[in-house]
Amino acid sequence: MIGRKRVSRKLEALPSSGEVIDLAPGWAFTVNCQHHGEMRFDFEPFRRNGMDVLAGQMRDAIWSLRHQVVGSTLHSYLTAGLTPFWRFLDDQIAKGSSISSLADIDAATIRQFLSWMELQVTVKGKNKGKPWSATSRKSAYDRMKTLLVNRQKYAAAETSPALRFPKNPFPLSNIVTPPRQAYTDSELSRLVSAINADLRALDQTGMESLPALQVLTVHILALAVATGRNPQSLLDLKRDSLRHHPLADREVLVTEKRRGYSTHSTAYQKDSDGEDSGEVQTTIPRTVGGHVRAICEFTDQLTPDAEPADRDYIMLYRVSRMQRKGQVLRLDIRKFNHAAATFVSRHGLLDDRGEPLPLYLARLRPTFGSRLYARTRDVRKVQKALGHSDPKITARHYITLSEDAERDHVFVGQAMVGWATQVDDLASAKLAADGQMPLEDARELLKGGYNTLIARCRNPFRENGSTCSKYLPCFTCPQMVVFEDDLWRLYSFYYKLIYERVKMNANDWLKTYGPVIKVIDTEIAPSFAPELVEAAKRQAQDSPHPAWPRGMVINE
């Protein structure tokens, strides 16, 4: 019997001899990103001081990552990662240390790079002359680590077996970095007034009354104020982002979070029918959906001229000058920030200090969260509105307490630490006479009414009626008072600072907390008997005051 030959159609891995190598096209190349368009990478400037081999290896690392991250992130590996690392290598070569390839980079090199960054000074901008911030140093380190780990994974033969990375070179970086500040009520009021003024102008004189980028900026700002969405999510709105709701008076806005590959859906009030309600017809959007539809209508004529990958998006504009004149591009965050600065300049917007208002979508998000929390006092409602996975993220980074809430918190804190004090009318009278203060203030001071987290305050009330809630400035404030009963609490804070020293950058700790330690040692401690000071130190070390437990993070 003759049968057909059996054919195996199973997929088999290529043998090692058939390995496919993805090589970069040259020292300069262009990467086309679906979000940021064409981005050029030029490695010629890195071919200096005999580092051609290392430059080629880093070029291959960036080339291999082009399908894993968006264009702006990929380009940041070049500008914020390789650029400072090459400056470090130049300094090392000047000292006689030769680093020409990945084989020369080991754990010691990484530690030297971290130490080198601590000594660098900002050369331009508002922080000119100041040391690099922890955020800048961490950003450079993280980007270089990504490139080096990529080479360890895909070109292990080229890397040194001694290349290791420290476990956590920037501890508590997410806490040390201050959260974005929400706009104050007065700043937000001025911003909303400017938005409304432009919307009225567009309604009365047409879309030609403002440049195209300013039209988009006005609607984006209105959406950010009303929704609190992520900046990138607003810039990535599509023509189908606004969808129907089962209820006739509602509609759903669906946004995508690019980094988390997730969607966020929220129902909003729908525009009412002007004919049925008897309202005057107007083109001014009054709802979230109204602003989205206005943008769709405004950019609809640009869709045919846009790149095929960009035609589903609504934030489109036509370039009016430079090399790309006439092209239709998607609005990115950098271009929006320039347009927002123009918006601020047109309206003369100022912050509460009288300076030009720094207008960023990222600050409108915590502004939305803080205002929603002020109305509801429910963190979980704010979490749901902002689309966070954890309420801790919402509470830590997106909610700013009002002045009244801070004042209430101060009074609660004073009551919590006031249990250790006693009331003595005779002592109050003596204190009032010796300390030159009203008798009522002396009584409050003794019974713990004016307690702080470290000692006591003769008068915590400011001239504008607010309550001082700071404690680090106490050491240079003439209102600070320290009793014997306060030494335990004071030295608990003292040893808390020392305990935190190993977790912080040495320069940051010395600049922030060094003067506090000096004041306690040289000015406060000599005012008490040595045995009292030693007893307070032992008690603070053995059992810290509840206000300063060892596991708590110092954050003022």
Image (cartoon, rainbow, N blue to C red):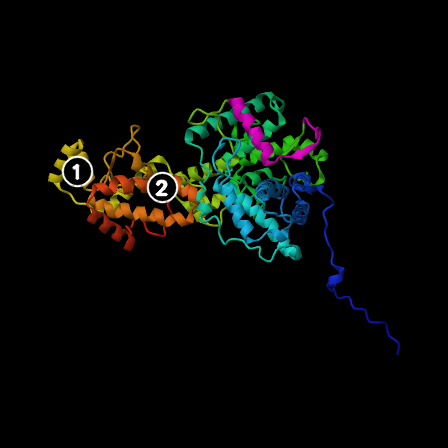
Q: Secondary structure at mark 1?
A: helix
Q: Nearer the viewer, residue 405 or 79?
A: 79
Magenta-colored span: 320-347
- Is residue 324 on the magenta stretch? yes
Can you name the residue that lies furthest to the front here? Answer: 96
Name the image quarter holding the C terminus: top left
Whether the magenta-drawn stretch holds residue 27 is answered as: no
Q: Amino acid at mark 2?
A: Gly
Hey, which quadrant is residue 422 in on the image?
Answer: top left
Residue position marked by numbered label 2 in the rendering:
514
Is residue 217 rendered to the left or right of residue 437? right
On the image, which quarter does residue 41 sit in? top right
Q: Is residue 334 left or right of residue 485?
A: right
Coordinates of residue 270 in the picture (x, y in percent) = 54, 37
Q: Residue 312 in the image: state x and y as whole percent.
A: 66, 40
Badge 1 amino acid:
Arg
> Which residue occupies the foreground of this view, 391 or 285?
391
Residue 166, visible in the rendered structure: yes
Q: Position of residue 549 (x, y in %)?
A: 32, 51
Q: Position of residue 45 (x, y in %)?
A: 66, 38
Given the current orientation, which residue lies at the most extreme right position?
Answer: 2
Residue in front for this viewpoint, 172 or 466: 172
